[in-house]
Amino acid sequence: MWARNLLLIGVVGVGVVAVRASLFPLSSTARQVNFDPGLACDPAFQHVVRQIDESFREIWTQRGLSPAARADDLTIARRLSLALTGTIPSLEEIRHFENHPPTHRIAGWTNYLLHDRRYADYFAERLARAFVGTEDGPLIAYRKRRYLAWLSDELLNNTSYAAIVRQMIAVQGLNTDQPAVNFIAATYDDEKKAPDPEKLASRVSRAFLGLRIDCAQCHDHFLEPEWKQSHFQALAAFFGRTKQVITNILDHNDGEYAFEDRVEGGRRTIAPNVPMLPELLPADGTLRERLAAWVTHPHNIYFARATVNRIWAMMTGRPLLPTIEAQTLEEMSDAAIPPALRLLAEDFAKHGHDLRRLILLIASTEVFQLDSAADFAISDDHEQTWAVFPLSRLRPEQVIGSVIQAASVKTINQQSHVFTRLVRYFNERDFVKRYGDLDDDGFTRSPGTIPQRLLMMNNPLVNEKAKEDLLNASAQIAMFAPSDEAAIETAYLAVLSRRPTDAERRHFVAKLTGTRGDPRKRILADLYWTLFNSTEFAFNH
């Protein structure tokens, strides 16, 4: 009996030490995580970063603008964590981050996140919105979870983005054995008993080329004179031989594609063809293989530019171009796109459409690391020219993901207990359903709603993550903080990824002074709830 009691005491003691070690920094270097800066140390990589920085500075000089100062490292770390993993950094990660030398700290942090399953899972969800939409799709014919798991694996392995897209457009097989075919299966039409060629043409042009050519689906495009109805339908014809037998996607060797001509009337047959850059279309392969090769060709400027524009928007909350999808070819021309977009797209194509390299490049730029506030009046010109970092409201999954992470001093990731990960998954799903999901493009600049604010204030999950429960960070901080000042600072780091201002510290330390036990826990819980419902918490900045 005494041996078991000693073992229990030992386990509890180890747990207490582990929690305290995550709450408060230790002098030992044994706990330091190595943040490898990777490509950021390469002179050629740095040369591209300087070119991008100079392209923005030239615009600021022309307009007589001064940019905001650089944001502090913790602010940049927070915006990177939100952009790449959908949640704020854990307190444990902040301790590791601050324990790392300042040199190449941001690049090392970015690289650390890019090798984490959280990044792969989150980016898979975000990209899938553009690829297949947010609907669950036809039952049995479409396996969304299998598709997302495959996409996450490809991102974690850093498979070339072009290779990922080629698989989605061209692969054949069962939707479980070849998960990429779910891109095709997501458009399955019950009446046609086959994937919908027009939906596929629309998704290929919008998701991979950043072009709204689907406006020519029923009639000639009213903005782009080069896009006729025949151009869109010829693009759809690449999917005209694609069939689906229960869960199997396959291509027939022959057959003509016919569409309903809503202008002239009747049905018309049309041969497959591309709406621009026909010289890049190979002659060999199945129809979908030829289309996939054309879309992802290194010289297809629309593919690289659309990808850069989308990834930039995913990281900053706003695309480099006025919209995520252009209405005309002119909007994607050399004369219309910002120099930074051209430089990033050229580098992206040159290096095999490497997403990790692209993300690291964006994170390394001066623009990405600027503050969102300044000691001068911020004009529309400052915002339009990226002279300040744009404020963007957190997405629903970022809000609840950050609440859940802030309530845990330890990082919630793939190494967490399966029960912890399952609880997080269901909590996020239920919260997003009530909070309201965004549209498929994911870049709607919504100001937020009163019901959303009320949900944050009254939602049982948010209240549960703030309350003085022993498993919550607020209670652990109350119990283990060596001083009132340390308790307040730790709570701010855990929730807002920053230290309190002097005024905030004085105000809340006064509330804690002389308290112990349950009253002290309740004060920390109230502070957590207050920070969860602050405007600052609701924004990436």
Image: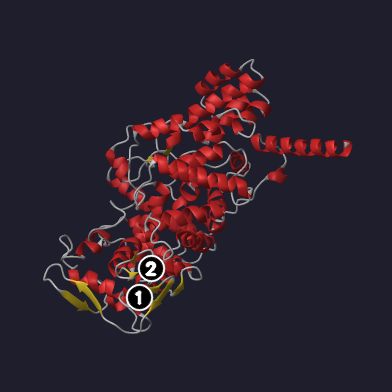
List x then y, in percent, for residue 135: 38, 55
Give the residue type that dot 1 points to.
Thr
Residue holding disc 2: 184
* Lateral position of residue 7 relative to residue 416, left or right: right
* Lateral position of residue 471 relative to residue 356, left or right: right
Check the picture and name the quadrant holding the N terminus: top right
How packed mark 1 is, by other alpha carbons closer than 10 Å (few <14, some 14-19, many 20 or more), is: many
- Residue situated furthest left in the rendering: 264
Helix, strand or loop at disc 2?
Answer: helix
The image quarter in which residue 434 lies: top left
- Residue situated furthest right in the rendering: 2
How packed mark 2 is, by other alpha carbons closer than 10 Å (few <14, some 14-19, many 20 or more), is: many
Check the picture and name the quadrant holding the C terminus: top left
Helix, strand or loop at disc 1?
Answer: strand
> Would residue 28 be visible to someone looking at this image?
yes
Give the residue type that dot 2 points to.
Ile
Tell me which label, 2 or 1, sits earlier in the chain.
2
| Residue drawn at 49 percent across, 62 percent down | 146
List x then y, in percent, for residue 300: 34, 70
List x then y, in percent, for residue 2: 88, 36
Compared to residue 523, the image places residue 113 above or below, namely below
List x then y, in percent, for residue 203: 32, 63
Q: CA distance from mark 2 to mark 1?
A: 9 Å
Foreground pick, 340 / 431: 431
| Residue drawn at 46 percent across, 48 percent down | 83
Foreground pick, 520 / 266: 266
Residue holding disc 1: 242
> Would residue 394 be visible to someone looking at this image?
no
Circle 2/circle 1 CB separation < 8 Å: yes
| Residue drawn at 55 percent across, 20 percent down | 508
